[in-house]
Amino acid sequence: MKIVRIAPLVALLLPAAAGLCQSEPRAIVVRARGNPILSDGRYYSTDPAPLVVGDTLYILAGRDEAADGVNDFIMNEWQLLATLDPASGKWRHYPGFARPEAVFRWAEPGRAYAGQIVKGGDGRFYLYAPVLQRDSDARDRFAIGVAVAESPVGPWKDAHPAGPIISQKVPIANDIQNIDPTVLIDDDGRVYVYWGTFGQLRGMELARDMVTPVGEERTITGLTGFFEAPWITKRNGTYYMLYAGNRAGPDSDCTPAVYHACQAYASASSPLGPWTYRGVVLKPVSSTTSHAGAVEFKGQWYLAYHTADARGGGHFRRSVAIDRLDWDDSVTPAAIRPVTPTRAPRPSPPPTRNVALGAQAAASNQPMPVQYWIRAVNDGIIRTAPLPPDMWGTWRGEGNPPHPWIEYRWPSPVTVDETRIVFFADQPPGSGIGVAPPAGWHLEYWQDGWKRVSGTDAPGSDLTQAKRFAPLRARCIRVVFDASSNGSSVAGVGVQEWEVLSPRATPPRTPPSSPVPPCG
Ligand code: FUB
C-alpha cells in the first residue's frame, strides 16, 4: 500500500479498520475542515454514493475534470473516499480508483458517470456503473455495467463480460438515457435496480447473481418532479427513494429555476411502488446538478451530496459534501427532516463597495421564465461561461419585453455613486433575436416615485458596462433597459451580475432572508 502524506495516528488506525491489504490502490490521507471534503480544487469529486462496510463509511464518487469555462461533464474515472468518522474530517482518498475502459472491455474511455457500490448476498462488492458502450448503434450509448470485487477498494472485474446489463438494447429496447443506477438488496435477499434521468425512472428486479433480470423493466411513477439521480434506501420496513427533482416555479417547494435541482423524496411500502411524494430533503445546491445518497453509519444517518463549493468549483467542477440527515418518527411512515448543509470555515471576505450583495432583487418579468434565476444578479459570481440559471433574463422566444427592469430593495436606505453591469449575450448588438446587449439602460431610484439618475444613460455594446453618478441615498434602485431591436423584433436582455457601489468599502452584506417591501 502506498500512502501519500499520511499522519501517524491515521496511518495506524485506518488501514486496520478498513481491512486494507497490500494490493490496494494508492491512497491519500485528507484532513477536511468541513465541506466540501476535497476542497482545494486539485480533485473535484461528484455524484457521491455512500456505502457502509463494518466500521468504515465509503463514498464512491466520480471526478470532474472540465477546464474552467468548459460546460461539459469531463469525467474519466471514479474515486473513493473512506472514513471511520465523518465528524473527524479524516478521510482516505483513492484517486484514479477505477476507469470505464479498464473495468469493462466493451466500454469506451470517459463519461464515468454516477455509479454505486453495494455488498451482494455473496459477500462480494458490486459496482453498478454507467459508461458509454463502444460498439453500439444505440441512439444513446450510455449503458450500465456491473463489476465485482472482493473489497470496496477493488480491484474490479467485469461481472457480466458479455456487455452491459442495461442499455437502449437490453434487457428490452428503451429510448431513455440509461444512467444513474441505484441498487437495493432487500431484507429477503431480493435485488432491485433503479435508474434514469431527464424525468424518466425505471426499476427492475435482478437475480441474486446481481446481473440477470428476473422481472420486467418498469416505468416508476409517483416521484413528483423526478429529474435524475435516484437513491434507494430502506428504513423500518419502508422504502425511500431520494432523487434530484426540478419541478420549478416561484411557488415550487423544490426550485425556482429549472436548471437547478432539489433533493426530493418519495416513500413506498413495496420496492417497486406505488410511490408517494413526501417532500424536499435538500434545497438546490451551488451546482446546477444535485446528486445525493443517504446512509446509516454508526447509528447516525448521513446525506452525501455534491456542490460547486470547492476552490475553482463550478457546475462541471463539483465536490462531495456530507451532512447529518435526521428522521421525524412522529409521523408514519417516518419523514426525512430537511438537511442543513454546512461548510468548512472560510476566511472573512474582504470589505467591498458592492452593497447589492445585501439587497433583495426583483424584476419586471415576474413570474420569471424558469430557466432564469433572479438571485444570480447579486450572488457575487461572474462566470466565463454562464448557464441560464447563472443570470436573470427576459428571452421568451417571441414578444420579448422592450423595456424590462430589475430592482434592488434594501431593508434600509443605502448611499451609492456607481454601478456596474455584467451582461450575457449570444447575439450581437442591434439584434432582434436571442439575447443581445441592450441598446441602452439607465438607473432610477425611488423618492416618492421613480426618479431617473442623471448621467446613467448608457448606450454601449460591451458585456461589462459601468457608470459613476453623484451620490444618492435610496432604499430602492432600478436599472431600466432598452432592449436591442432590429426594428421588427426585440431581443432578450441577460444580466449575470449587477453591482451597485457605495463610496466606501464595508464588510460584505448578505441578502435579507425575509421579503423586503417594495418602495412603490
Ligand atoms: O455527473 C454526471 C451526471 O450529473 C450524473 O449522472 C447526474 O446525476 C448528474 O449529477
Image (cartoon, rainbow, N blue to C red):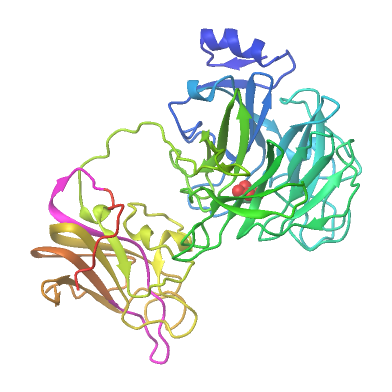
Q: Report the front residue among 246 and 334.
A: 334
Quadrant of the rendering where the N terminus is positioned: top right
Magenta span has 434?
Answer: no
Q: Start and end of the magenta stretch?
A: 481-509
Residue at 75%, 17% in the rendered image: 23
Residue at x-position 44% and y-position 29%: 34
Q: Is residue 131 above or below residue 202?
A: above
Asked if residue 441 is positioned above or below residue 308 in the image, the reply reads below
Q: Residue at x 47, y 26 (%)?
A: 32
Task: Answer left or right for 323 relative to 344.
Answer: right
Report which quarter residue 480 is drawn in: bottom left
425 with respect to 203 (left or right): left
Q: Is residue 365 above or below residue 165?
A: below
Q: Relative to 149, is 175 above or below?
A: below
Which quarter of the figure is the C terminus placed in? bottom left
Q: Position of residue 501 (x, y in %)?
A: 18, 56
Residue 44 makes an appearance in the image: no
The residue nearer to you, when weighing 248 against 337, is 337
Q: Position of residue 110 (x, y in %)?
A: 69, 45
